[in-house]
Structure formats: C-alpha cells, structure tokens
Amino acid sequence: MKTQTILTVGSLAFDTIQTPAGKADSVLGGSGNYFSIAASHYAPVEVVGVVGEDFPKEHLEWLSTRNIGVSGIKVAAGKTFHWVGSYDRNLNEAQTLSTALNVFEHFDPKLAKHHQDIPYVFLANIDPVLQQSVLDQIRSPRLVACDSMNFWITGKPAELRKTLARVDLLSINEGEAFLLSGQKNVLKAALEIQKMGPSTVIIKRGEYGSNLLTPQGFFIAPAYPTSQVVDPTGAGDSFAGAVMGYLAEQGAHRNMVHSDPKQWERLLRRAVLAGSVMASFTVEDFSFKRLLSLNVSDLVERQNALIKMMSID
Amino acid sequence: MKTQTILTVGSLAFDTIQTPAGKADSVLGGSGNYFSIAASHYAPVEVVGVVGEDFPKEHLEWLSTRNIGVSGIKVAAGKTFHWVGSYDRNLNEAQTLSTALNVFEHFDPKLAKHHQDIPYVFLANIDPVLQQSVLDQIRSPRLVACDSMNFWITGKPAELRKTLARVDLLSINEGEAFLLSGQKNVLKAALEIQKMGPSTVIIKRGEYGSNLLTPQGFFIAPAYPTSQVVDPTGAGDSFAGAVMGYLAEQGAHRNMVHSDPKQWERLLRRAVLAGSVMASFTVEDFSFKRLLSLNVSDLVERQNALIKMMSID
C-alpha cells in the first residue's frame, strides 16, 4: 500500500433529493462515494462499505479506474441504503424525509489485511462503535480524522467521546459542533471539542465557509461563492475528501502537531481551502456529477481565485 | 471644515432591547450615534438628526468631546424616536416589536452652510427621499455612502433607485441585498446592485462577516469571532462608521475607482476589516457601551488577530 493511501469507511447509497433547483431520484450518493471521489484527486483511496445487490457494478468498476480501491466494498443480500431528503431555501440544512438503512443496518467493517496498514484514515459519519472497531484494526495510522452527526451526538454520546479521544481531526457541521460542545460560539465550540481529543477541529458552516482550530491558531476560511447551487448533498463529505487528500499528498503526520506545529498549521489551512473549493464544485449539480468532469486546472483556478478573494492586498 | 470630516444623517434614538443575554430599557441608540461614535476613532464627524426634549443633553455634550459635531442635531418639541426590538437565538436578525417615530416622523434635514462643504457623506438608513434631499445640499462630495432596509426597498423602490444612482458605496444586510437585487447568491446580488449605481457594494452577513464588491474584485471578510455577543444592535452602523472613518482618514476619493482602482481596492479591503473589528466590539455590550472604553490599541490588536485568522501562511 502506498504511503499516501487513505482508507475511508462510510456509506454508499441511493439518494432521492428535492432542492429549490429540482429533483433527483435514486441517484448515487453516500459519504463513501463523495469522500473518495474528492480525495482521489490528491491520493489513492480504499473504500470500506456495504452495498446491496441492486447497486450498479459499473459504478464500482468506474471507481477502480480512478485510483479508488473497491475490494473493501461488500455486496450483501438485500437492498442498498436509500436516503430521501429535501432542502428548502436554507440550503445549509437538509431535512431527512426517510432513511432506509437496508444492508447498511448490519454493517460491520472487517478490514482485510492490506487495509490494516493504510496510514490515513477517515471515519465518515457512522456509528461511533463502528468507528472505534475500525481504529482497533488499523496498525499504525499517520493521521485519523472523523465526522459525526446529531444522531450519534445525542444517541451515543459516551461512545462518540471514545472515538474523539482517538482521532487527530474532527470535521463537523456548525450546528452539530454546538450540540456536541454545548457552546453557541464557533471558537468556544471548537476549543471545547479540542479538549475531547482531536488536536484539530474543522467546523463547517455551509455557504459561509469553515473554521479551523489547531493548537497553533484559528483560521477562518471562506466558501467559494459559486452562484450555481443545485444540491448541497455531499458538500461536507467532499470537503473532507479534499482535506484528507491534500494532507495525504503532502505527507502530513499526526506527530507534526508537536514536532512541527507551524508546518501542521500551514498544511491544515491549505487543506481547508482545498476542501472549500471541492465543496463548491459538488453543490453545482446533483449527486457527484460535477466532480466527474473536474480536472486539476479547475481546482487550481478556483483555489487561486479564492485566495485572491481573501487576501488583504 | 477639515478635509477628512464625515457628515452623517441618521437617527438618534432610545432602544428597548431583549436578547438572549438580557434586557436593556430605553438605552441610547440610533444609527447616528453608532455610526458617529465608531467613525470618530478615525476622523471628525458631524451628525445631522433630530431628538425630542427628553433626550439627555449630557449625551450631546459628551459627543462633542469626541470629535463629533452636534450642531446639526435639532431638539424638537416632543419625544425622541423609540425602537423596541428583540433577538432570539439567531442573533443575526432583529425582530421589531414597536417603533415610535415621534419627532423623527417629520424629520427634514436642512444642512447648515458649514455642513454643505463636508467631503465625506454617510446616509444612514432613512427615507430615500431625505437621502436625496441631503445630497442635493452637498456641494462637492469626495465620497458618498448609504445604507437602506426592507421598509424602503419594498415601500419606495423608485426613490431608493434614485439614491443608489448617486452613491459610491452601499453597505447593506445580506437579506436586504437579496430583496433589493432579486438574487439569492451574494456575489450575484452584489453585481446586480452595482448596476444600480454604487461602484462599490458591501454586503453585511452578521457573524459570518461581510463581502465587498468593487470594479476590481470580490473580497470575503470574516467577522471577528468574539465569544461575548450580548446585543447585535448597532453592529451594522458601527461597521459603516469604521469603514467611512478609515476611508476618510486615508483620503479615499470617488475618482480613485477609475484613476487608481488598485489603491481603491486596497483601501476598501482594509476599511471592511476595520468595520468587522468595530462591529465585534459593539456587540459585546448593550447600546454603544463597549465602544466608549475602546482605544487605538484595542482596535489594532483585534485587527492584527483577525488578519492572522484569514492568512494562509
């Protein structure tokens, strides 16, 4: 396994989505898809997850062509996870209309031997018990990041705390950060979460960008102001994919937080901008359609534009 | 009159405010107060407005001690404008519970001779007909800025357009920018408003900062993440006060937009940061209490901290 490879454990799903811009019926989605497609622009990815027999084999084959290993995706008897959601004019928050877990209900990630040596790990928003089970199987991680959500924050707070004690980086939505920390200010919330374990906390604020707390400082990153917001689904997961992809590409290591905190800070700030740029493309179409046609020049161009928009000179 | 002097026309009021942090009863407020106190840190200010006989003379005397001319504040028979409002957990938006215009109802700004030569003009959020009447009386403005609100956008759209055609800079809330432009994206909204007249548009986004559009570019400015938000009232007016104060202090001129667009851009970006910093102090206490104890070091320290939080290195 390459030294830059990222392992991600998350969902592969069908999404049915209504937004002010239109409707998409049973399109491909899930954190595993969004994260890995975004991250694969920077580094190789291995996905661990489960799909039903109804999941298109062509999609798995297509992922393989993009530096995304799919040997960890189990095809189980039954149907694929299906999420039905909608967004009203406040595009920053999805409303879940129904969730059919299907094969995802009994998901129990067992890592193959060659997955246990992967250095970069992203635990998408799944049961914190499973997140820990994955970490138990990883031999010597260079960097571990995770996401979570309201459902686990209120439903399994003790287990989530155990996960947080073991990760370097938490990437989480603003509302969830407030719920997790009991704070209503973004800086206070990040400081409170930092005490729970992760040295580094990213708070995602949708169209308002994101905030980053490290032991060295606090960074306020703008979102790229795309004017074509079609569907926000997957913005957070593709944001995280670009963040982890960039960090893996650059060889970031958890020890840097202490051994070279300035370099850690520098890498994290750039990683967050890469995340902003990736998320801004994701929202421009349904599913991850917009990510498919992206090339390096698109990413570079938008990142340079964003840096100009935040520079005081 | 000094070449840096700013004339502002706006309200002087009593505010009764309920926020999650507490309640304040009949405290001093109004755009004229917030704007001038903020701007006076940078440049001399002359205020044009009207108060009732119940308005404390000591406050007018105190303003004079701070480089704020009050000869344009008329004391009329009757009561002072009184606004009653509240904020729920969403501190970005005030709910008006009652408005007693009182003497403000028949406010008709007649400028004294020495006011007609003032080079910098800020038209706070008042009837666009009065905004134009003020502009008719100004002899040779170097720079004119204004604010507006939902009430005038929907109530006097044609008159507001006439004002906009005559100003260099509009500073307006995000929701109002969307209403005025018919756009729901902040960049599109700013571009649309630019077509209405102002070469430069600032869209205020509360705790999420502000966006600046000039003919040269688009700037995304963060808010300073103060953790002590007591009362958001006056944040927008004190933001505008620091913006205009900084621009006047630096000698910005409307012609710069064409003659030296890079310098215009540079000054505007810094002005917007000065606005962010000032607003972050305003919200830390009721009324403009927090601004009273501010000194230059406080402003410099917070501005430097903010610049660090937005720098990628």
Image (spheres, coloured by chain):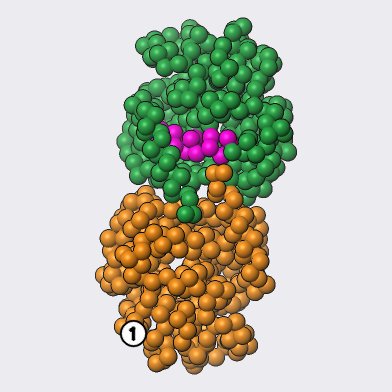
Chain colours: A green, B orange
Q: As displayed, is residue B265 above or below residue B80?
A: above
The residue indicated by pointer 1 is B139
Q: Residue A276: within the magenta?
A: yes
Q: Secondary structure at mark 1?
A: loop
Identify which residue is drawn at 59% across, 25% down: A251
The overriding secondary structure of the stretch rendered in magenta is helix
Q: Is residue A249 left or right of residue B142?
A: right
Identify which residue is drawn at 42% across, 87% down: B115
Q: Is residue A44 visible?
A: yes
Residue B51: give x, y in percent of width and height. 51, 86
Q: Chain of mark 1?
A: B
Identify which residue is drawn at 60% across, 22% down: A121
Q: Residue A65: within the magenta?
A: no
Residue A283: give x, y in percent of width and height. 39, 36
Q: Which quadrant holds the N terminus of chain A?
A: top right
Query: Quadrant location of residue B306?
Result: bottom right
Query: Quadrant location of residue A302?
Result: top left
Residue B285: give x, y in percent of width and height. 65, 66
Residue A224: give x, y in percent of width and height. 43, 43
**What residue span does the magenta drawing correspond to?**
A267-283
A202 or A158: nearer the viewer: A202
Identify which residue is drawn at 50% across, 69% down: B246
Q: Residues within 10 Å of mark 1 (few under 14, many from 20)?
A: few
